[in-house]
Amino acid sequence: MPFFKRILPCLTLCLLLAAPAMAGHDAKKEPKRAIVVAAFGTTVPEAAPAIQKMVERVKAAYPGVPVSLCYTASMIRHKLAKQGQTVPSPAEALAALPDQGVTDVALFSLQTIPGHEFNDLERLAQAFSGLPKGLSHVEVTAPLLYSREDFPRVAKALLASAPKDRKPGDALVFVGHGTDHPANMAYPALQYTLWREDKNAFVTTVEGTPSFEDLVSELKARGVKKAFLLPLFAVAGDHAHNDMAGKEDDSLASTLKKAGVESVPVMAGNGDREAVAAVWMDHLKTTLDALPGK
């Protein structure tokens, strides 16, 4: 019997046995979702719990969905690493997921506006989407102030966080970061929206518009003598402690003191405010519901 005919049954059997394994290797993975919480980060120990609180909200809302945390700020990660704390970057957090069987990711942005950091996350998500043997889809959730509907909702949520001992005539000043990005327009838009609810509620920024000088002019025009200062950040971190409430001459507290306005810092960020956090959580739901998998 020719050699080929003798081994043909063996070859056939081997191919039949190998077929399921080969099919499994080539088959597309079942969709599996995950959530990566992307915070700027903080090195202020008392501010970090606000970020963890957001992580716990996500875990409670989506039991069974893997949830991880990353910090977008490299300088924060490096400082923490020197203290023995390791927090991954967004790229590192995403790269770890395919080995866990994850195919689709909601990158949960804790940014306030769609500025430079948000754009960086969008570019990263695009780079990680559709890679061979990698993630199929990575979608970034909307930041806090994104759609037209966000502004009145966030304004009401911020006003609801006013200190209980605020008296008529006292101002509320929400202090944001500010940026040279066109998205800085979100801050004046929030200011306009707040004024429709409360004429003594103000927005100011460390590096954008409205500036500290803009704020002082408005306070003087209204005869305000006392202002509560509230961070418009996810956490009451370095900017809140130094740029807002610090003793340096150029801090907001010092600027107001020179203008004859008493200031009372309130060290709680948006991650501590349930009504504000709910806006972020709704943005997460919108993104996650649009992803494949469970």
Image (spheres, rainbow, N blue to C red):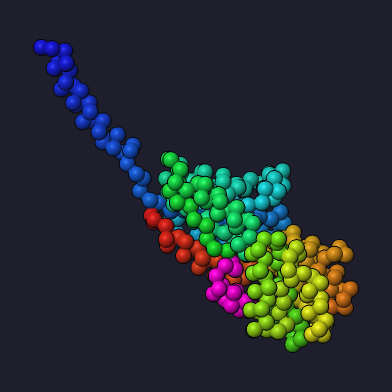
Which image quadrant: the C terminus?
bottom left
* Quarter location, residue 56: bottom right
Q: Residue at x 72, y 43 (%)?
A: 82
* Quarter location, residue 101: top left
Q: On the rendered structure, is 169 left or right of 113?
A: right
Any part of residue 154 in sight? yes
Which image quadrant: the N terminus?
top left
Highlighted magenta segment, given as a residue range: 144-160
Residue 158 within the segment the image draws in magenta = yes
Farthest front residue?
182
Query: Which of these two is toward me, 255 or 131?
Result: 131
Q: Residue at x 42, y 62 (%)?
A: 289
Residue 131: image x %, image y %? 46, 43
Q: Residue at x 58, y 63 (%)?
A: 143
Residue 167: image x %, image y %? 75, 85
Any part of residue 66 in sight? no
Q: On the rendered structure, is 24 left or right of 118?
A: left
